[in-house]
Amino acid sequence: MAFILLLPATFAALWWAAAAADGWRDRFLRAAVAFGLTVVLATEMLSAFGLLRRGPMVAVWSVALLAALARGWRTRRPAPWRGMRPRVDAIILLAIVGCLAIVIATGVTAAYSPPNSTDAMAYHMPRVVYWAEQGSVRFFPTPYLTQIMLQPMAEYWMLDGYLLAGGDWFVNFGQWFAALGCMIGASAVAGLLGARARGQAIAALFCATLPAGILAASGAKNDYVMAMWAVAAVYFALQWRENLERLTGEIRIGPENRGACPTKGAQEGGAGAFACQPSLIDALFLGAAVGLALFTKATAYLFLPWPIAAVLLPAVWRQRRRAAPLAIAALVCALAVNLPHYWRNWDLSGSVMGFDSAQGDGLFRWRNETYGWKQTVSNMLRHAAEQLGGRSSRWNQGVYGFVLAAHRDLGIDVNDPATTTRWSVYEAPRNANHETNAPNRWHLLLLAVVACILAWRALRARDRRRAVYALALVCGFVVFCAYLKWAPFVARYQLPLFVLGAPLAAVVEEFGWRWLRPLWIQLAICLFLLSGARLPAIENWVRPLRGPRSVLRVSRDNQYFADMTHWENRASYFAAASALEGSACRTIGIDIHNLQLEYPLQALVREARPDAQFVHTGVDNVSRRYAPSVAAVACAIACLDCLGDDARLNLYRAFPTRVIAGKFVVLLPGQ
């Protein structure tokens, strides 16, 4: 398990070695992108030779650590924490303490909880298990195509930790680290958008206190990981724009700065100094961050083009002869990161994105069946309403009634199957402490107020850059609603938009009137945001810190089922695991045709028998042409939710011994 320390050690070395002109935050974001590229390169390189095992993984990360240390030593970089001493300011100190408290609370939760969200049980962790078995990230036969075709960056991160630690002990820390990176990135972007030190601190606190973010930070999903790459991409795009504007003279360089780069906003604690010439390195960092975002979650294709275009397009157009080659280099870099997975998906489905539904049959299609302004408005209303859930049932019913009335006025069904995920029914929003549908209502309200202020300023020819950036985020939301179907669990997909909107919260530093000092308004807003973060931090419905179901009290085995209570099948998993442990079989087939939540069974079996291997059986889709994850033939079958399904069980007549394990059936060879 000690080998897991190679990952944080390598990141620390990359942070130390990072070439930066803007202090510790710039170095952190550069190190994060370099670390992400190292994860992708190490995983793909070892996969190409079938060497995704602990030994080769230790060797590769050791080399990466030594290379980062050698670069840092050669360039004599100062310690990354130099320059981290903030001004003594009540708001800044409150923001730092608040962010640290949230980071610690979610870190403790992540440490004491196994991966246990439903998606982690169905595809995040199973794909990690099968990759580790086969020593490769090649596609394998599976009834649930999501396990192979969705973007794998977050799972690569999980896989490296899984191999180094010898289990899932540190899987949750990918999202936790990304949450920290988003706080740092949001404050850095706020600085580049013109915010002073206090505004940057408010932006970080806004990001830290997002209820959906707090709940997700201790789990094993990928929304926060994608958000970190997205905010890093916006940061590097803003930095590149600053360099281009210096070339056009929009930011003037005085005689005292000739031969050196000016420091924009340094007196106000702004973003700091930049290279005077846009460089290939900056373009590659931008491209790498974009590529990593696209490699993590497909919603990046919907969210990210708009803020990047809003930031870069005007400056790139004015300096197109100089900027065009660098823009092409950034694009090539972004595509190169995704190329291996593009190729695997093309081989599977004839599309670089894979099929448009989880089973490849169109039954649970993610995209809308029809397109138009009415469908888009319908999804916008339902998604916005999901973010407005509160404690008051009267309020929630009022929001629900408004959405229903709006649909009647539009002449469309609120549950139109063309824009609604199959079997989903729109209901009143609620005050959920669950990462899939937790509302960010107060953060949404604050962003709406800020957007109105920026729109007013833009009409008066002021603050147009932040106004255009806000408009770009609105465009991302509109495109998201125009393309994807509504579902009650899609609220979490919007987390990256809130993170990208966090830098706009810095406008709060300018709130105030003659009779009310800005400090008191800022203090009240920060305290209010922190008060709303308390319950998500300690009463996560899936991973609570306090109470009888606390992660500090409940055994790790039982925590696997915390998000699966409505299936009422925990006893089935334990019974099936017991039956499999009692057999002499090492290669276990799992039939997930009726239920895709297979990871708890894998985890329970491997606790007793670490040498156990798994293969999918009963696969009847296009993925069956791929080689199984292991070459050995299954000598026992666990058929999930197969009790009473004689048609399914008849596929396994070669296994005459049937052990009933609750809703599951374990099939063993005859004596």
Image: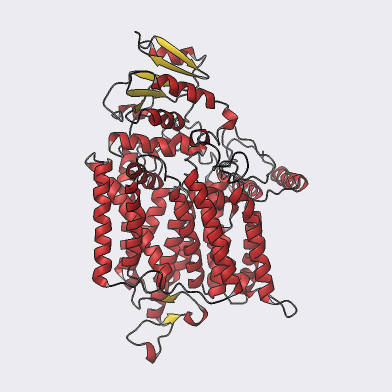
State which quarter of the image contains the N terminus: top left
Q: How is the image coloured?
A: secondary structure
Q: Residue at x 24, y 44 (%)?
A: 56
Q: Is residue 190 left or right of residue 152?
A: right
* x, y percent for residue 14: 32, 62
Q: Is residue 175 left or right of residue 10?
A: right
* x, y percent for residue 119: 49, 38
Q: Residue at x 24, y 39 (%)?
A: 50
Instruction: Examine the image and state in which quarter residue 162 appears.
Output: top left
* x, y percent for residue 57: 27, 46
Q: Please say if 314 is above or below 645.
A: below
Q: Please say if 557 is above or below 572.
A: below
Q: Is residue 93 left or right of residue 591?
A: right
Q: Is residue 310 left or right of residue 140?
A: right
State which quarter of the image contains the C terminus: top left
Nearest the viewer among 483 and 393 is 393
* x, y percent for residue 573: 49, 25
Q: From this viewpoint, which residue is outermost toward the front?
A: 553
Q: Is residue 195 visible?
A: no
